[in-house]
Amino acid sequence: MRATVLHGTGDIRCDEVEDPKIQLPTDAIIKLSASCICGSDLWPYRGLQPMNGPMHMGHEYCGVVTEVGSAVKTVKPGQFVVGSFVISCGTCVNCLNGWPSSCVNREFMSGGQAPFARVPNADGTLVATAELPPEDLIPSLLAASDVLGTGWYAADAARVQPGSTAVVVGDGAVGLMGVLAAKQMGAAKIIAMSRHKARQELALEYGATHIVTERGDEGVAKILALTGGVGADSVLECVGTQEAMMQAINAARPGGSIGFVGVPHGVSLDGQMLFFAQKNLLGGPAPVRRYLPDFLDMILSRKINPGKVFDLEVDLPDVARGYKAMDERKAIKTLIRMG
């Protein structure tokens, strides 16, 4: 089969690779209905993350099970499934405590930008729908695999409460999902920080009440002006840069919470500053598997439509165009059709 492989900075190809096979009794093989490009895929694409040879790309996936290992009990061939980008066993103490993204047997999904994919620890990672979903819901179900869960975790970690004020730093797909999550959690004021018209419009559609275009200290000053000089109850950091993290910390009120989900690159924090700021920080890889059953219920009942975050679709052989469009910020998020 053909699959997406990154060979070096800016060098993304659709190569011929071996079909995935069952390797362990806990594995499943799925035929992907669609895959997509994640913002985190752009870090190695831009040469900002080390590579040890060619990388098989793709960690967001949904599709139909074609084969399972002898130990798999919760999914079977013919079922439509959505899985987390973090592979988890579902039985260790961290999984049982609601932190599958810190599973003691954790792996990170790869090779999902392809027609077929192997999913280890299928029982702890995949969730099946009761029946095959309608075609128009595939983008939203795909979003549940990572980007929706990551934005949701940002809001959850930032302790968004009904009636609260939430700020979202970052207007990429994760930030937009953070806006959606904050709305669903009942935030009364949702301030999206964005300079891009199309992203601003989608943020407003998802529930943002205010748009702030300024960044850095100017952006923080605007947040303070909108919050009576105090700062926000909750801030969602969805970028991963030093500027974004400091903007998030400084925009939160004392006692407020920052949920940070942007993969950090070059971020360092001063202990003295944190000590006197008196703010809560929680972040890391999203525990998507914890949220998946609720996500599927909300999507299948059409309560939420995270699939709108995909504003470009490409066929697998044309995947390089999807990467280029996202790298140049001409697309928010690219969906890959398997054909």
Image: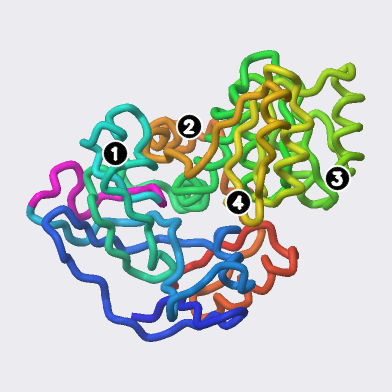
Q: Which marked residue is nearer to the observer: mark 2 or mark 4?
A: 4
Element class at badge 2: helix
Q: What's the CA distance linking mark 2 and mark 4?
A: 30 Å
The Cα–Cα distance between marks 4 and 3, rounded to whole angstroms, is 18 Å
Q: CA distance from mark 3 to mark 2?
A: 33 Å
Q: Which residue is mark 2?
A: 298
Secondary structure under badge 1? loop
Residue situated in front as seen by the camera: 93 or 64 = 93
The numbered mark, 3 or 1, whose residue comes first in the sequence reads: 1
At x 70% / y 62%, what residue is drawn?
Answer: 331
Question: Are dots 2 and 4 in contact, CB under 8 Å?
Answer: no
Residue type at mark 4? Pro
What amino acid is at disc 1?
Ala
Secondary-structure class at tag 3:
loop
Image quadrant assignment for residue 290 = top left
Tag 3 or tag 4, which sits nearer the N-term? 3
Q: Give the residue at the far front of this rendering.
A: 272
Viewer-nearest of discs 3 and 2: 3
What is the spatial separation of the Cα atoms under label 3 and label 1, in whole angstroms? 45 Å
Seen as rendered, the residue at the extreme top is: 163
Numbered circle sitting on residue 264:
4
Residue placed furthest toward the left: 70
Q: Against 232, is 66 above or below? A: below
The stretch in magenta equals: 71-85
Image-based side of 47 in relation to 164, left or right: left
Q: Nearer the viewer, mark 2 or mark 1?
A: 2
